[in-house]
Image (cartoon, helix red, strand yellow):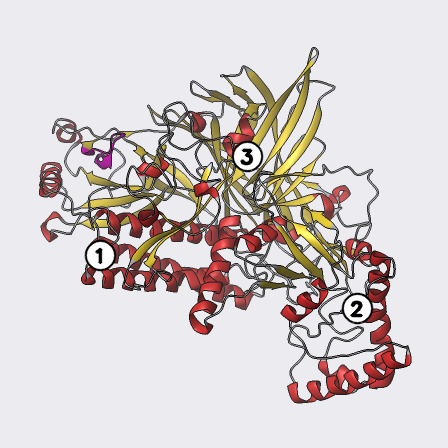
Amino acid sequence: VINDEALPSYKESMAQMRLGLDFIQKEFGTRPHIGWQIDPFGSTGLTASVLKKLGFTAFIENRISNDFKKVLKDKEGYNFCWEGHQVDENKEDDRILTYILQYFYTLPGLRLDSGFIGRNKRSYAQQFWNSKIQTVIDSLNNASGGTVPEYHIMAASGDDFAFQNGHQVFKAFDDLITELENLGTNKGYDIEVKYSSLYQYFEDFKSLNLDLGVFKGDFMPFQETWPGWSWNDFWTGYYSTRLHMKRWIRHTFNNLESIKAYLTIKAVQGNKGSVNFKSATQDSIDKINEVINEAEQRWAIMMHHDAITGTHTSVTERDYYNMLKESNEFLTKAYTLINDNLGLEAERSIHDQLKAAVDKLGSNTFDHYTVVNPTADRRSEVINVTLTSSLGADDTYAVFLHYLNGNNDTLFKNVHSSYADMQDMDTSSHQLQTVRKLFVHVDMPAFSDAHIYIVPCSKSSSQCSTNGYIMSSIAKPSTTLENRVLDNSRIKLEIGNDGKLQSIQNLKHSINSSLTERYTAFSTRGTRSGLYLFNPRSAQLTVSTGPSKMWYYELPDLKYIVQVEHDGGKTRFLKTYSIDQVGLEENLEQFFLEVHSFTSELWEMSFGITKGRNSSTSQFKTFIDDSLKLIERPIYDRHINIRHTRAEELYGYFTSPCVNGGMLSETVKKGNTDEVHQFSWANSNPIGCTLSSQNQIDFMVFRNIGSNDQKGVYETPMDHHTTYNSFIFRLDINDGAYKRNFAGSVLNSPLFIYEDLGVSPAANKRLTAPEAILDDIFSTSPNSHLLHGSIDVVDIKLVRHTILNKYNDFEIVMVLRNRFNGYLSLNKTLKHRGEGLFKNKFIDTMKSSSKNSNEF
């Protein structure tokens, strides 16, 4: 499908396109190398990079700003070289030959096939010539100084659901071709009009040997003049439409990444590190891959430019939710098949110890959670699981962790944990409900799994505490409305008694900043903006919420947490702030925030944070992370004169799609030197961000549309789901935030958790041992200070080899990238040619490099 370009991450775009290309290769024995991407609402440089990496040589685009199309009108016939996001100037050329449709993918002045069929072709040929042909002739003459020997002009036709009478349409085209050739001959041209292909067009155009212009960057936001309207239209609101679905789409992709890694870990390590499997294992891997493929196909549809964007009808929305549900069900099935058929089985002593714990604690069952690290980095984090055991408020649990330590030794330990009865907002009723969360610290090597076993104690409190096990401690909340401080050795966060942020301090660098929260909304009642536009800044409303409720939890050596409810009747927020007390330094330097939101008002509603100035002379810049590169974006300024929709609609130009996060950079004068303070964030799913008033960020967390969309949806969409968006925030200096937050946060590449609940020891269920692979490739020297996510695993698959002569051979196929080329080094004993691992190619690690090899 034609994927959206504003909202999917680099990984998602790459995975979705690769899936389609693999299907075409399998079914038709060929692989396309010309892209046709004519309907997404704006284009990002990320797309050019993905296409180039996948072997595309040319690209057709359409929906970019009309103002830029007017610039192209005087250039090389709407052709240019598009340079995507080059992370480093030493990388291979990311330029791709690009053609932009002149106006739209419709015929000039026509939308329906009935209008074309019944049109007088002789008179229409003149209109067609003036709008489609003469403009390109003039452009090519201008570009070549009138020396171009011939002209090649592409004309597309069609529209959504508008061309249905094929036989009559082609007859009408035959008549139009005749009239155009007669018209061209009369104008003195040796002309041929024919049905052609994209390949032929680009081959003919390249033969002109024109020195094409180069465009760097992206075409966001999409701006157009809608037919019949006298104003320009910025399509930006869809960045936050149907946010609940956007979150689930990203969750499903994270599940896909994790299950592929889990399959690879279990199959390879269960086979003594080899990819030469016996036939029975080969069959198991094939069956599991078939199940994963079913899941991936359903997820891939969500990348469509009318799916992840939310620009679809409510009936279609139900179908999309069903697809996501089915996708996750297939992945659960794949997880079960992996556990039942692959991997090293846990030692019998593990079963015995769990059975003994169940017997001692008076429980009939235990809960089993598998944690997968699908990244190329060591992970040391506090994770939580939602407990389902129906125990009393003061009951407790014994938690066992089966894991690999830093030396890859397998350990089974009864570990420290804490649990708390916390607040959650129900997705459907939007009311608060109490859920029991258990927190535990895990430390995991790259590409590994760990297993958590939770045994509830059903005996009396005194018996539970004297049975010889380390029992989880309960964190009972303080509910007093008072100022709260969350801190550790690296960060200090202050929250006022109104439940809103007050300040953040980086203790390592001795810098701090005041923070101010706000909640705002725009009415969508009566606006014609539909699914795409924000409302005017002048019409911004302050959201009034009821008295706050606050819950403060201390989980010793794990986390400090504050939960806050703002209840305004029709509008409600539930926020959860937390700071880790253990883990990697980069995790200790940040605070986590999850925002649950719901409103039944006809509003576009935002949650905002303002960073206080450190100096009256401070200069601010804003950036968004599109998952491949930090891109500077303009700061909202009401005095900037740009063309916009109408006086009552917002300058949509200042709203950006935050795919993975963003950053607010403040340059502070320190005597004769400048110090850069960076307040950065990562977000769990794509969301619309407005960067305004120089030091303010607004996240649109909820959208209800109060009028007819008028652009294909033809309804007034209301979101009936609670939306929930997770963020990580950090205050740092110079390039600290850039290199840490945007290396890939724990939100963007999360540890994934699978659950087996209510396991009976008597059932002798097969339990697998924790394992890790590729440690020789991704281990680093002690002084390299590897940042999580700098080596980014775009994809990893265990598949049958499609290149070698022996089809039965398997390989590990990996797509990797390094977001900070030259900043990090691999293990010093591992040499690589050029960029080696980081070239975004398919890499067969197991076959190309034996363990401890000195050359890759």
Kind of residue at badge 1: Phe
Kind of residue at badge 2: Tyr
Indicate the position of residue 223 as horizontal and vertical percent values: 74, 54
Residue 714, above or below 685: below
Q: How packed is label 1: few (under 14 Cα within 10 Å), some, or many (20 or more)?
A: some
Q: Residue 277 — which label?
A: 1
CA distance for labels 2 and 3: 49 Å
Is 403 included in the stretch rendered in magenta? yes
Horizontal relation, residue 186 to residue 593: left or right: right
Foreground of the two, 243 or 421 = 243
At horizontal 57% and vertical 40% (from top left) the residue drawn is 87
Indicate the position of residue 44 as horizontal and vertical percent values: 63, 50
Foreground of the two, 595 or 311 = 311
Indicate the position of residue 551 as horizontal and vertical percent values: 43, 30
> Which residue is identified by label 3?
681
CA distance for labels 1 and 2: 57 Å
Indicate the position of residue 648 as horizontal and vertical percent values: 79, 50
Which segment is the magenta one? 395-412
Main secondary structure along the magenta-highlighted residues: strand
Is 687 included in the stretch rendered in magenta? no
Count of numbered circles in the view: 3
Q: Secondary structure at mark 2?
A: loop
Q: Secondary structure at mark 1?
A: loop
> Which residue is identified by label 2?
151
Quarter of image, res 205:
bottom right
